[in-house]
Image (cartoon, rainbow, N blue to C red):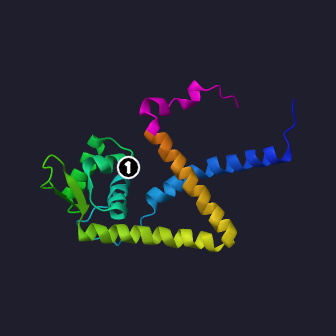
Amino acid sequence: MQVASETETLSRQQMDQVLEVLPTLRRWLLRSVPKAPRQEGIVPLPLSHVRVLIHLYQRGPLTMGQLAHGLGISCSAATECVAALEGRGRILKHRPQADRRQVVVSLTPEAEAAASRVLSYRKVVVGDVLRHLSPMEAEAFVKGLLLLALKAEFWMDHTDSSQRAPLAEKEDIRA
C-alpha cells in the first residue's frame, strides 16, 4: 500500500470539500429568491422560471434557440417555460422583421425588477463571503469559480446528454 504525500492528501481533501459543497451551492442559487409578501391571486414562480428570468435579465432579449442553449435545456423545455411566463405577464415575444421565423423573447418591466431583486440578494451574500477573504484569496476564489464554470460549460457544449449521466459507469471508478 502506497502512502500519499502531504500535498496529495491536501488535494484529495480539497477535492472532496469542493465536490461536497457544489450541490449546496446549486440549491442556494436555485432557491435564492427573496421572499415577497404574498398577495392574493399571485402564485410564486417555479425555480425553472426564475432561472429563465435571470438569464434574460443578464443577457437581454434572446431568440428561443439562444435561450435554450444558454440554459442548457431543450428548445421544447424553453418554449414551455416561456409560454408559462408569457401567460403570467413576465415575458414578451416578438418576431424580428429581418427573420420572421425567429421568436425573440424579452422581459416585461415587472420581470426585470424581480430578476434585479434576486441578483441583488445574491450579490449581498457573495459580497459578505468575499469580505471575509484577503484580496489575494478573493482573487483566487473568483478565478477558480470562473475556471470551473468555463470547464463545465465547455464539457456541456461538447458532450451530448447520452454521455453525461452514465459517466461513472464508463470509467473504472473504485471507492
Q: Which residues are magenta?
A: 158-175
Q: Nearest the camera: 124 or 72?
A: 72
Q: Quadrant of the C terminus?
A: top right
Q: Secondary structure at mark 1?
A: helix
Q: Nearest the camera: 157 or 87?
A: 157
Horizontally, residue 40 falls left or right of residue 4, namely left
Q: Quadrant of the N terminus?
A: top right
Residue at the spot x=24%, y=61% of the render? 106
As drawn, 163 above or below 101: above
Q: Which residue is mark 1?
A: 71
Q: x and y percent of residue 27 in the render?
A: 50, 54
Q: Quadrant of residue 75?
A: top left
Horizontally, residue 163 falls left or right of residue 46, namely right
As drawn, 99 above or below 159: below
Residue at the spot x=87%, y=37% of the render? 3
Horizontally, residue 172 falls left or right of residue 123, namely right
Residue at the spot x=31%, y=49% of the render? 66
Q: x and y percent of residue 92 in the render?
A: 19, 60
Is residue 171 at all visible to an observer of this figure?
A: yes
| Amino acid beneath label 1 | Leu
